[in-house]
Amino acid sequence: QVQLVESGGGLVQPGGSLRLSCAASGSISMIYGMAWYRQAPGNQRELVAGITSGGNGNYADSVKGRFTISGDAAKNTVYLQMNSLKPEDTAVYYCNADIIATYTDRRRYWGQGTQVTVSS
């Protein structure tokens, strides 16, 4: 069994910052990459940022220059530093991981989501 546990969401004013964390646990053999997605009410879930096991990151155009994704391989944890937050960043943020677990095939796992609200 693999679990992804997110933390760090909350309410912040426009222009503020938040740092999200996602820790993967369980019988993990290999993590190929981790990513953050978000879903606002009425919208489809979209990729925000991703990072490979080699440390290469990619970002949605809407967050480039404001968000930074990083990882700690020893802790099986990925972070999303969000700066200069805007009201349109308000969404539920989901962690996603591409993992091979013991006795299972490679597949993607999802966290439960954490709410980020940007409002004055």
Image (cartoon, rainbow, N blue to C red):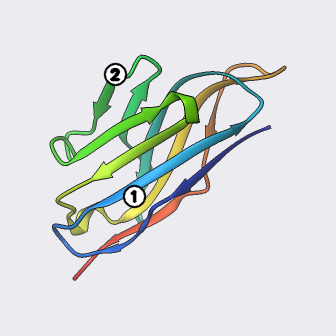
Residue at image mark 2: 56
- Which image quarter holds the N terminus? top right
Determine whether 119 is above or below 64 in the image. below
Which residue appears at 38% of the width and 22% of the height?
55
Q: Nearer the viewer, residue 104 or 45?
A: 104
Q: Is residue 54 visible?
A: yes
Q: Is residue 44 visible?
A: no
Image-based side of 114 in relation to 46, left or right: right
Q: Amino acid at mark 1?
A: Asn
Which residue appears at 28% of the width and 41% of the height?
68
Determine whether 15 is above or below 2 in the image. below
| Quadrant of res 2 | top right
Q: Earlier in the sequence, mark 2 or mark 1?
A: 1
**Mark 2 or mark 1, which is nearer to you?**
2
Image-based side of 62 in relation to 69, left or right: left
Residue at image mark 1: 43
Determine whether 44 is above or below 58 in the image. below
